[in-house]
Amino acid sequence: MFHRTLALTVALLLSAAASAAQPAPHYFVIEVVDAQTKRGVPLVELRTVNGIRYYTDSAGIVAFHEPGLMNRRVYFHVSSHGYTYPRDGFGNRGKALLTTPGATARIELQRANTAERLYRITGQGIYGHSALAGRPAPIREPLLNGRVLGQDSVMALPYRGRLYWFWGDTNRESYPLGQFATSGATSALPGKGGLDPSVGIDLTYFVDDKGFSRKMAPLDGPGPVWLDGLFTVADAAGRTRLVAHYARMANLGKRLEHGLMLYDDDREVFARHARLDDAARLTPQGQSLRVTRDGQAWWYFAQPYPCVRVRDDWAHALDVARYEAWTCLKPGSDYNKAAPALDRAPDGRLVWGWKANTAVIDLKRQKELLAAGRIKPEEAWIALRDAATRQPVVAHRGSVRWNAFRRRWVMILCQHGGTSLLGEIWYSEADAPEGPWRWARKVVTHDTYSFYNPVHHAFFDQQDGRIIYFEGTYTRQFSGTKVSTPRYDYNQIMYRLDLADPRLKLP
């Protein structure tokens, strides 16, 4: 009896699943694809004449059903960040489609971006329209995973045979609206049970008893807890550990405390290791990269320029006084704007180099030194320019990785104050991780929308580094845009870049 009941239950579930996979007959399906690759394009807006807006899901699908607009030739305005559609004689970009229920139409876009937009990684309804259209999705949780509606800024690295992912503030569908003490998930590596990165990422979230992505860096006291500078190091017993810098914030601009955290594998949570003084000159920051020089392994920290490093050694990693800065100050000096302790050789040459427990000279400080006449323009280390226009490019955040295909260090960075405030993504190269970084090419644009804190995931590189993958946070924050893009806003989007593309040639 039990087996018969079980078999009946399974049959009913399979029947329900099969029914769910069938296209709903009242939907008209629109496929939007990249004309070059024929792959579906996410984040394309289709807008009717009366202002009804649809956005393609990660498969480039819109399932259209509007009472009163079915079985009619409906005009759709077509627009998407970094993609174009031809204008008609009136200057409109769009197409009229016969909205027959059960039918399918295709729209092809030309890609202006050098990089190709692939899919959304986080949030609700990643393949929502595909589900309505009865089409399969390539990921395990295509509609809602960990009850996550939005997540800010990712760090990820291989750890103990899996990929570990950590984000900042995280939104959910109910009240309270989210949690603000870092979220986390794991996924299998490609080739070891994980999906090809061109297809997607199957995230397994660390969740609470209600199934929501839980706090991974809980601390007593008010304010969100943000992590950065995530890296691994072997402890005194030879066991690999996760280390990160943390900051507990009062608001975007005011820090309440900061220090170092260690990941507790038994509890699956970060715990405070040491609280640091606000005057600490150097800490892990931004995105980490491992570098070997003269037989010594180091962890460099890029924000976006790798201006801080520490030996890949337990004792060094936990002692911020032993961290080093790429700087032109005298060793052991703080930064004093009024009287900077510049490190000059006897012949007057400004000495840039790695110096222990010394303040960093970042772009802001370099500008101050230039404005005051303390250093000459030809002595500036940070001087990134657009390879097409020779105009300066002000880098905001990014990551640096070694690339075997280009045989150079490559940087994916977000521009501050470009065509959109934080929505322009650039590619650059250098012979050393600290630079100098001189030239860049724009690879992604976002129209009046932010796409900040991009990171290149080198563990996804393909064809010996010719194909690279990077993601960033798509959000209207700081952009000036008044209306959020439904489902996509405040989430992570993956791009793919072919480093053999001739448009990436640098001087």
Image (tube, rainbow, N blue to C red):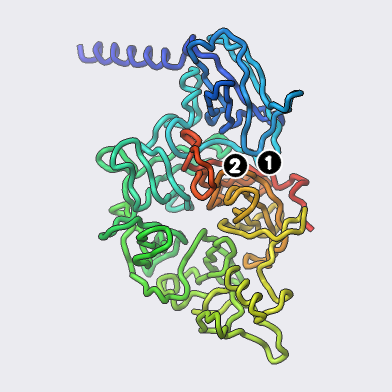
Q: Can you say which quadrant of the picture contains the N terminus?
A: top left
170 sits to left or right of 363: left
Q: Residue at x 44, y 78 (%)?
A: 321
User: Is there any visible trace of residue 300 in the rendered image?
Assistant: yes
Which residue is at the far left? Answer: 1
202 sits to left or right of 401: left
Q: Residue at x 43, y 37 (%)?
A: 123
57 sits to left or right of 16: right
Q: Amino acid at mark 2?
A: Tyr
Q: Quadrant of residue 353?
A: bottom right
Q: Nearer the viewer, residue 375 or 462?
A: 375
Residue 264 image position (x, y, % from top left): 32, 57
Placement of 62 over or under 341, stated as above or below? above
Residue annotated with mark 1: 113
State which tag comes first along the sequence, 2 or 1.
1
Contact (CB < 8 A) between labels 2 and 1?
yes
Residue annotated with mark 2: 495
Q: Amino acid at mark 1?
A: Asn
SS category of the residue bearing label 1: loop
Q: Quadrant of residue 31?
A: top right
Residue 235 image position (x, y, % from top left): 39, 67
Q: Quadrant of residue 89?
A: top right
Cα–Cα span, label 2 and label 1:
10 Å
Mark 2 or 1: the one toward you:
1
Placement of 135 over or under 211, stated as above or below? above
On residue 273, which mark appears?
none
